[in-house]
Amino acid sequence: MAGRKKSIGWRARVLGALLLGLLAAGAWAWWSLQHWTPDPRDYPDQGAQIGAADGDVRFGTLKALGGGFVYLDASNGARGSDPRFAANLAAARDAGLKIGAVHRFDPCAMADGQSANFVVLVPRGRDLLPPAIALDALGDECGVREAAVESELMTLINQIEAHAGRPAILQVSKTFEDRYGLAGRLERNLWVVGTWARPSYAGRPWLMWTANTALSTEAADEALRWVVVRP
């Protein structure tokens, strides 16, 4: 009986040690993921996408951490806008960062209203980076057919490019690409999203990559979207 108790106790200690090791490994992996960014030797041009959900961002700190640019959430569909866009634009300029603006495409709204929303909010200037159009919302909920989504998107792209004076970048989510498969048909630079592993869902080379969607930094109280540019 005593031998059996010793055996059970030994097994319990081993299992406890294994469990503790797994918990420690999981905690380390979680911490590492929160603080991971691609090696700057591989991706020397790095920055962040910033919006109201990120709260007060310390743009000078972001620059000190290696960020050279920011893309600011600007307009959303035909009527929505990021309430911190103007303040973030001014603060990013004061910090000496390169700045771009992001419009979130709404497949349920006409292109004219969406481009008007962007034009009113985002100033025209050669000092700004190429505009980005975020493609993640689907038109299924409003019954818009695929051909109509592509048509309105192309109209929106042309209108935003006319305002900006340069080609737009398309930030294509995996969900959007799986649904519409437009990345291979639209001749624009691509911006893909996927933490840690380089995404391949676009089916062709991309220019920009959101490499960590929840990076913990000293630059903000909330997690940031960290972005790199392909050399």
Image (spheres, rainbow, N blue to C red):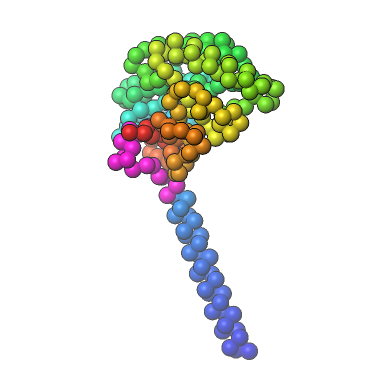
- Camera-side residue: 32 or 39? 39
Q: Tell me the quarter of the picture where residue 58 sits.
A: top left
Q: Is residue 39 magenta?
A: yes
Residue 64 visible? The answer is yes
- Camera-side residue: 25 or 89? 25
Q: How many marks?
A: 0
Q: Quadrant of the C terminus?
A: top left
Please report the residue visible at 53 percent of the width from the left and 69 percent of the height from the top.
Answer: 16
Residue 117 visible? The answer is no
Please report the residue visible at 60 percent of the width from the left and 13 percent of the height from the top.
Answer: 110
Q: Is residue 176 left or right of residue 46?
A: right
Reply above or below: 9 against 39. below
Residue 127 image point, x, y percent: 33, 16
Reply above or below: 85 against 34. above
Main SS, magenta residues: loop
Residues shaded magenta: 32-47
Please report the residue visible at 56 percent of the width from the left and 29 percent of the height from the top.
Answer: 181
Residue 161 image point, x, y percent: 44, 14
Residue 94 image point, x, y percent: 32, 22
Please report the residue visible at 50 percent of the width from the left and 33 percent of the height from the top.
Answer: 202
Reply above or below: 48 against 37. above
Q: Is residue 185 magenta?
A: no
